[in-house]
Image: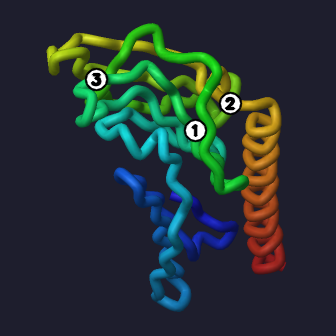
Amino acid sequence: NNNNNNNNNNEMLLFCRNTGLSIRYDAQIQTFHYRYLPMSSEVALFHTYAYAYAGDVLLCFGGWDSISKLSTDAVFKYSIKDNAWSKCKISLPSTLSSTAGVLVTQDEQPHQTYVHLIGGTKVKEVDVSWHLRTKAIQWMSLEEIQRWEQSRFNKMKIEQEKRNNKKNKKKKQKQ
């Protein structure tokens, strides 16, 4: 969910097999906009992967290849800004699929944001009791982290300006 500064746009990204799709809703004119997104041929092999959205990066953990009947330990990321997929250099400690990914953040600070991978299935569709906590920034490039921090700073600045404008309005009304 990406909101612009005046909260009139919401965007949802869908990735399934060979298809990537962006669906954006403009509330001001009550219109949907659709755009195809690139899909990595390597990611397209997998389904039932866990995912988490951090900054402007979609992180995809593990997944199941129904052709080879194997799960993977690979981690892929989709950069919204660059409109491109890449494979992370490090991988999960184990192969995994059908896992839930939850992003937990404290004060929206990138260095205090974690991805929790919970549950899942291993080889031969054996359910596992799994909980892995990993820092979101571990899977991101320095540039992606800096963009995330800048975005956070800009949001805080906008919120502060809104509060100041509200206070100034109240002061003018009292006069």
| Residue found at x 25% / y 16% | 122
- Residue 145, position as x, y percentages in the image: 75, 34
Quick check: marks 1 and 2 in contact, CB under 8 Å?
Answer: yes
Q: Is residue 35 above or below residue 44?
A: below
Q: Is residue 20 above or below residue 138?
A: below
32 or 152, nearer to the observer:
32
- Residue 102, position as x, y percentages in the image: 41, 31
> Dot 1: what SS?
strand
Give the Cα separation between the discs numbered 3 and 2.
26 Å
172 or 53, nearer to the observer:
53
Q: Between tags 1 and 2, which lies in front?
A: 1
- Residue 25, position as x, y percentages in the image: 48, 76
Residue behind mark 1: 77
Horizontal arrangement in the rendering, residue 98 relative to residue 164 (left or right): left
Residue behind mark 2: 140
| Residue found at x 76% / y 49% | 151
| Residue found at x 48% / y 15% | 92
Mark 3 or mark 2: whose residue is earlier in sequence:
3
Horizontal arrangement in the rendering, residue 173 relative to residue 40 (left or right): right
Give the Cα separation between the discs numbered 1 and 3.
20 Å
Q: Which class describes the residues within 10 Å of circle 2: few (<14), some (14-19), or many (20+)?
A: some
Q: Which mark is residue 70?
A: 3
23 or 69, nearer to the observer:
69
The amino acid on which the numbered mark 2 sits, given as a three-letter code, is Met
Quick check: marks 1 and 3 in contact, CB under 8 Å?
Answer: no
The amino acid on which the numbered mark 1 sits, given as a three-letter code, is Lys
Q: Is residue 37 above or below residue 41?
A: below
162 or 47, nearer to the observer:
47
Q: Which mark is residue 162?
A: none
- Residue 113, position as x, y percentages in the image: 59, 27
The amino acid on which the numbered mark 3 sits, given as a three-letter code, is Leu
